[in-house]
Amino acid sequence: MTQRWKSVMTGAAVAAAVTLPAIADNWINGPTRNFPVKSVSVHDLVGNLTIAVRDGGAVSVQVSGAKRRVDETSVRQDDGTLSVEGGYSHAVWDWRHWFDFSDNTSSGSLSVKLMVPKGTNVNVDELIGDAKIGDTMAPIQFSAVSTNSTIGRVGEAHISLAGSGKVTVGDVAGDLHAESAGAGRIKTGSVRNVHADLAGSGGLEVGQVNGGIHLDIAGSGDFKASRVNGPVHADILGSGSVAIAGGEANPLHLSIAGSGNFSFGGTAVDPHIDAVGSGNVHLHAYRGDLANSGMASVKVGE
C-alpha cells in the first residue's frame, strides 16, 4: 500500500474539521484573470473548486470568498502552468494540530472558479472541500482529504481520497490509478486498465475495464467492476471483497489472507488461487488449469 497519506482521518473528524462558515458581509469577488497556459495546478485548497470546460481560449480564474481567504490565495503562472495555492497552514499536518483547520475556516469560506479549454491537464492536490470538474478529455491528478466531488470524462486518471467522502468520475480513456484510505469511495465509468490500492473501509467501483486489473486491498474495502478483458491480479488482506460481473480474466491470480471474498461472473483463464484464512472464491467458469493452494473455499459454476 502506498504510504502517501500524512494521516488517515475518520469521517466524523474530517466532517467536523472542514465546516466552512460563510461570512456574508465579508465576501468579495476577485477579478477574472486570463492565462495562456496548457495546464492548471490547484494546491492546498480549503474551499470549493469549479473547473468548467470550453472549446479553445485561454484559461481564466476567479477567486471569491472572505477577504482574508482571497488575500491568502496565490495565483501565478509558472511557465505553461497556472498555479493556484489556497494557502492553508501546513501546521495542519503537525500531529498536535490534526483535524484543526480553524486558522483557515474561522475567517470564512473560499471559492475558486476556472474556465479551461478542452485538453487542459489538471492537477488538484490535497483538496478539502467539494469540486466540480467538466469533461477535460485530458490527464487528471486529483487528491483530496475530504470531498464530495464530480469529474467528467478524462484521459489517464490518478485519483486519491483519504478520510471520508466520494469522488465520481466519468469515462476514463486511459488507465485509472486509484488510492483510497479511510471510508472514502471512488466511482468511475469505463477505463482502460485499473491499478488500485484500497485501505480501510473505502471502496472503488468502475464500469467496463477494457484491459486488466491490479488490486491491493487491506482492510474491509471493496472493489466492483462490470466487466474485464485482460489479466486480473488481486491481493486481499483482511475482510475486503472483489466482485467482477463478467468478462475474461486472462490470467487470474488471486491471493487472500483473512476472510476476504472474490466473485467473478465471467471466465477465468488458468486461475491461480492462494489463500490463508476463511476466504471465499466463486468463479462462474474457467478454462485451462485451476491451481488452488491454501484454505479458501472455491466454487465454480452457477
Image: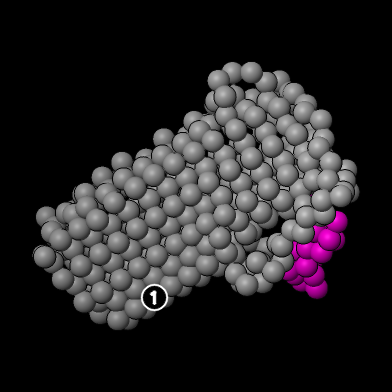
In-image side of 173 versus 130 (left or right): left
Q: How many marks?
A: 1
- Pointer 1: residues within 10 angstroms few (<14), some, or many (20+)? many
Residue at figure coordinates x 82%, y 64% from the top left: 102
Depth check: give the residue in front, 243 or 252: 243
Q: Secondary structure at mark 1?
A: loop
Which quarter of the image is occupied by the C terminus? bottom left
Residue behind mark 1: 239
Magenta segment: does it hold 88? yes
Magenta segment: does it hold 206? no
In-image side of 134 versus 175 (left or right): right
Depth check: give the residue in front, 129 or 275: 129
Dividing the picture into quarters, in which one does residue 39 lie? top right
In-image side of 106 versus 243 (left or right): right
Let me know if residue 178 appears in the view. no
Residue at figure coordinates x 26%, y 74% from the top left: 280
Residue 74 image point, x, y percent: 82, 40
Let me know if residue 21 appears in the view. yes
In this picture, which residue range is highlighted in magenta?
A: 87-107
Q: Amino acid at mark 1?
A: Ser
Residue 282 image point, x, y percent: 20, 67
Give above or below for 141 relative to 223. Answer: above
Residue 108 image point, x, y percent: 81, 54
Q: Residue lying farthest top?
A: 57
